[in-house]
Image (cartoon, rainbow, N blue to C red):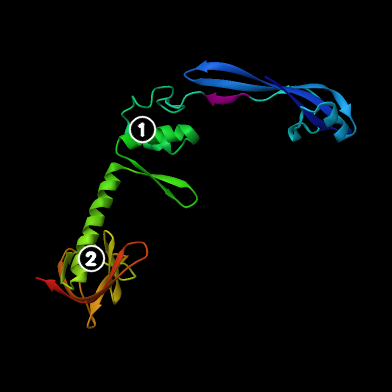
Amino acid sequence: MVITAIGFANKFYTLWQISEETKPLGNGRSYVITHYTYVKNISFDKETALAKYPGATLNENLRGMTRSWDSAPKEVWDNVDTFRFGKYAYTKITDNTDTNYLEWYWNQVYSDHKEYVGNVLKSRGYEIRTWGDNNQYLMSPEALENERIEEANKNEMLDILKANNPIEISFDHNPGFDGCCRNGNVYYHFQEVKENYYQGWEYYLPVVNGKQKRIKNKNLIIKNYTYRTEDNGNITVEILDFDIVK
């Protein structure tokens, strides 16, 4: 198909013919080369030039051009079910069992090809989520299971908190500088912590009645607390007092 276009060079509006040439490369891949062929000068006046060739469009890419040229080859694909690059290039995506690689590949591609790869991942237990301005990210089956467990634990904790029952818990880490220890979707906040050092590394311990308490890997019973549910769905438990089970 040949398209008639009008450009502008120096003083004259110019007449061009634009056509595309497709060179098949196999495996659904082709190179497309666009040929820009200069025909002649038309007129000094734009309206006159457009009137002489009413089917032509004014092409800003032709401004200042007076010689014919070809574009650089552009790679195009007529299928979506084949890897387009990488160590599995030109092989069928559904035949591939390297799901970790397929997850990486999904993050590198776009448009309908990305959608196809995403559907293959969905068939393998993945979930595609959207955040912000149509940004997408993958949730692996493992991540989805961890999320499910965290949500179940959070709901179980909510039942305990609503009933004002004692909380029995053990932390495998010290609180941070802000006094918080995280357990899934629940953040436990100690009212006061003190900074300590061990071989140049800083760590923090809760302070109760002026005394520091070592809590890491110990069983705690929290009887006195308040709690709140955050806008992001997490829970913050304000620890007012606790006992260490010996």
Query: What span is in magenta?
Result: 73-77
Name the N-terminal-most of marks 2 and 1: 1
From this view, report whether residue 95 is shown above or below residue 200: above
Amino acid under label 1? Answer: Val
Q: Position of residue 239 (x, y in %)?
A: 24, 74
- Relative horizontal placement of residue 182, taking residue 32 as reference (left or right): left
Query: To which quarter of the image does residue 10 belong?
Result: top right
Task: Tell me the residue at 38%/34% (across/down).
Answer: 119
- What quarter of the picture does the N terminus occupy? top right
Task: Tell me the residue at 25%/51% (across/down).
Answer: 148
Q: CA distance from mark 2 to mark 1?
A: 37 Å
Q: Position of residue 58 (x, y in %)?
A: 77, 33
- Relative horizontal placement of residue 186, taking residue 53 as reference (left or right): left
Q: Position of residue 203 (x, y in %)?
A: 29, 67
Judged from the image, the secondary structure of the residue bearing numbered disc 2 is helix
Residue 101 appearing in the image: no
Task: Tell me the residue at 25%/47% (across/down).
Answer: 145
Amino acid under label 2? Answer: Leu
- Relative horizontal placement of residue 133, taking residue 35 as reference (left or right): left
Q: Which residue is mark 2?
A: 158
Judged from the image, the secondary structure of the residue bearing numbered disc 1 is helix
Using a 10 Å C-alpha cutoff, classify the residue at mark 2 as few (fewer than 14 neighbours), some (14 to 19) or many (20 or more).
some
From this view, report whether residue 222 is shown above or below residue 8: below
Q: Which residue is mark 1?
A: 120
From this view, report whether residue 242 is shown above or below residue 33: below
Using a 10 Å C-alpha cutoff, classify the residue at mark 1 as few (fewer than 14 neighbours), some (14 to 19) or many (20 or more).
some
Q: Position of residue 75 (x, y in %)?
A: 56, 25
Task: Tell me the residue at 28%/60% (across/down).
Answer: 185
**Residue 75, magenta (yes or no):** yes
Indicate which disc residue 58 carries. Answer: none
**Residue 80, magenta (yes or no):** no
Number of marks in picture: 2
